[in-house]
Image: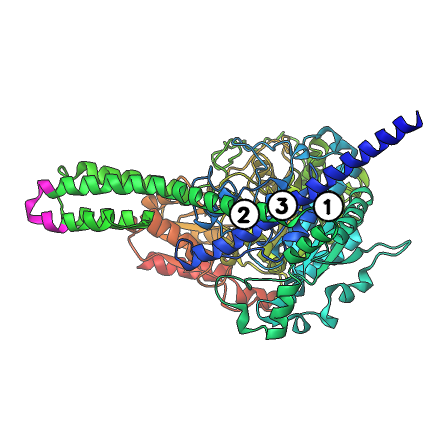
Amino acid sequence: MENTFEVAQHSEEKLSFDKFRLEVLEDYRWAYLSREVSLISRKEVLTGKAKFGIFGDGKEVAQVAMAKFFQTGDFRSGYYRDQTFMFATGLATIEQFFSQLYADPDIKHDPFSAGRQMNAHFATPFVDEQGNWLDLANRRNISSDISTTAGQMTRALGLAFASKCFREVKELSQFSHLSNNGNEVCFCTIGDASTSEGHFWETINAAGVLQVPLVIFVWDDGYGISVPKKYQTTKGSISEALKGFQKEKGSNGIQIYNVKGWDYAGMCETFEEGISLARETHTPVLFHVEEITQPQGHSTSGSHERYKDKERLQWEREWDGMIKLREWLLANSLTSEDELEEIEKEAKEEVREKKNEAWQRFLKPIKAQVNKSVELINDAANKFPAHSAELKKLAKELGMMREPMRRNIMRVLNHAIGIVHDDDALFWLKDFYSELQKENASLYNTHLYNESGKTIINLSEVKPLYDSDSPLLNGYEILNRFFDQLLAGNSKIFAFGEDVGQIGDVNQGFAGLQGKYGTERIFDTGIRELTIMGQGAGMAMRGLRPIAEIQYVDYVLYGLQVLCDDVATLHYRTKGQQSCPLIVRTRGHRLEGIWHSGSPMGMLINSLRGMHICVPRNMVQAAGMYNTLLQGNDPAIVIECLNGYRLKEKLPTNLADFRVPLGIPEIVQEGDDITIVSYGSTLRVVQEAAHHLEQKNISCEVIDVQTLLPFDINHSILNSLKKTSRILFVDEDVPGGAAAYMFNKVMEEQSGYRWLDIAPRTLTAKAHRTAYGSDGDYFSKPNTEEVEALIKKMMAE
């Protein structure tokens, strides 16, 4: 019996060792494959097949170690050097990597961005084609990468915070496809130099306060492009600089670990400990991965030999993680030189093969277009002897291109059509050109907003209903009752921001609701607009419906980068595979003082394409807009009127159900002589002026645009202009801001100029910020007398 037991134990130990050996060799294989991908990709850029390249060479060993602990349900919010991690987890293939390097717009070839993003920008689908959230709890999830340094940090906070919500809010347990009781970890990767960004520090502080399962890997290769870290970071070490954040018994904070990027065994052991801590206790963790090398330098734009001395370069060659892993495998008798050489040989062959396959897949549809274009141009040449030589030359030049691009085809076709003007004879050539225009528009110009069942652009209006005894309430009381019904009916709704929780926001929209729905669903944050936006973005990407508040629209600037680069572009840059239905609630417009009276609509319009911008004139209208937005998956910002919270409004009986359609202006006063277009609190100034002008027999049609993005999708303002032949756009943004935008939309896009009897006008605030006090407001922004005077002048022309 004893001998049998010893044999069995020996057999189990051998199986365990063999399994371990094969696992480690597989890690080496992925690391070597990834290194070869980096080396060959650089050559592809330098030979002109790709435009630019940035790679993860030097980080291979750390990333295969990290990949071991990325579990089903986890999320990654990383940056553009994580290719090895993606290969090792099976979430990216070598072919897909090269397809993205070549900017292949076929989503089957580049499933991360359909050629819309630079190489090494990864993503996995979060929603299906109808906009429904996928089973995220049972798949490994990659939030779409962005290039902005440290931009991934704030979103990572939100992705991790969502796990806290799923764990602590019992009403969310029904959504088992979105979370496994909050056991998910968000992996966040960042280069050491980017820890100098404010995004990093604000995220670290917020994560330490909130206690969320955020695991940060800092890849420290000693440089930020060419600048050594002694010029980047206090004490030359991010882990040293962060010591005050170290979590201690009885405190919040973060757990900090130091590891060496070439120490495979050490990283595996430490990563397992730290990630388990985050998963089980929701303690945020930071791994400072030091002594990483960067064999090819920062990117294909230059050489690191320009800024690294000979000693540093020699050290990097000796301490390259690939070399150290190879040495460790041999020293521990886990493999032989022959076996490693065979792995390396096969890896090189595989990368070259996959690279060629990706290139041929990229070229195949383009060459088919070239062939058809050449055929059609030659056919036209035979029909038009006078232009034959010129057309055949074009066809020959196109046909001889070794590596044509879609733009080459379009330019040649356009040139050929321009040579001959016979419409009938060029029917097939023009038809093919038109077909390619539509195809290319589909490849490059779609999915800025949802095009699935979750689009809300064409959502029908549901009017507010009133009883004869409907009470008159202050605007903030309308919102308070609305949010109460909203939170009761939808457990995915969360509201948070500065002063939102305990006091119910500075204008009382959420007054009393934290006590009713709990501190987990309505809560205060620190004064940190950047990460409030990131927190909301990450939550929304995980299928929740956050309403993230920025106290005043002036302060949107703090969070603008997150909204502009991440939230607004997400649906586009993943070609509809990820959505972020974040609602940003803020307030602004008419108030006395430089810092709380902002109306930077032009800035928002031009920064936030991909979001909806709602500018309600009162709180009933705001409630209807929230109802509409919650029907879809697009992000939005709602700017409530600061001076409207204490204006009396009737309470609708269908407060939770009525909807204000987006992009549909409302005629708030009919008239025949002039059309006045505005929105928000300025409408009250306009309506007062219109009332005075009516006494002077000037009939004004006043139109509230309601939303700036989208803007008047049915051209209803044009219909008003056709009636009045005069138009004035009034706005309290700076000159050239939203009023100019509205002017452009109506005059150019809607061809409104055709119906004018006199020159159209804009009336805006002054170019400076609003001066303090009532007089400052009067003289800084459009006032009733200015509106009246300008309209009288227009009527006299």
Q: Write down the region rendered in magenta.
A: 382-390
Mark 3–mark 2 CB contact (< 8 Å): no
Can residue 661 be seen here?
Answer: yes
The mark nearer the N terminus, 2 or 1, is 1
Could you say which is closer to the camera, residue 88 or residue 429?
88
Closer to the eye: label 2 or 1: 2
Q: Position of residue 414 (x, y in %)?
A: 23, 48
* Alpha carbon separation for disc pair 3 and 2: 10 Å
Which residue is the extreme one toward the top?
Answer: 1
Closer-to-camera residue (462/164): 164
Name of the residue lying farthest toward the left: 386
Residue 299 placed where, x, y %? 52, 61
Image mark count: 3
Secondary structure under badge 2?
Answer: helix
For the residue pair 517 and 154, the one nearer the viewer reads as: 154
Foreground label between 1 and 3 = 3
| Picture coordinates of residue 630, whole percent (x, y) | 60, 36
In the picture of the structure, the residue carrying the numbered disc 3 is 339
Question: Is residue 550 something one can see in this rendering?
Answer: no
Is residue 387 on the magenta stretch?
yes
Label 2, label 1: how many angstroms apart (C-alpha)?
Answer: 44 Å
Pick the front one: 132 or 2 = 2
Residue at the disc numbered 1: 161
Secondary structure beneath dot 1 equals helix
Q: Which residue is mark 2?
A: 345
For the residues bearing labels 2 and 1, Cβ distance under 8 angstroms:
no
Which amino acid is tagged 1?
A: Phe
Disc with the residue nearer the chain's start (3 vs 2):
3
The residue positioned 51% from the left and 50% from the top of the image is 679
Q: Which of the colour schemes (rainbow, by chain, secondary structure, one colour) is used?
A: rainbow
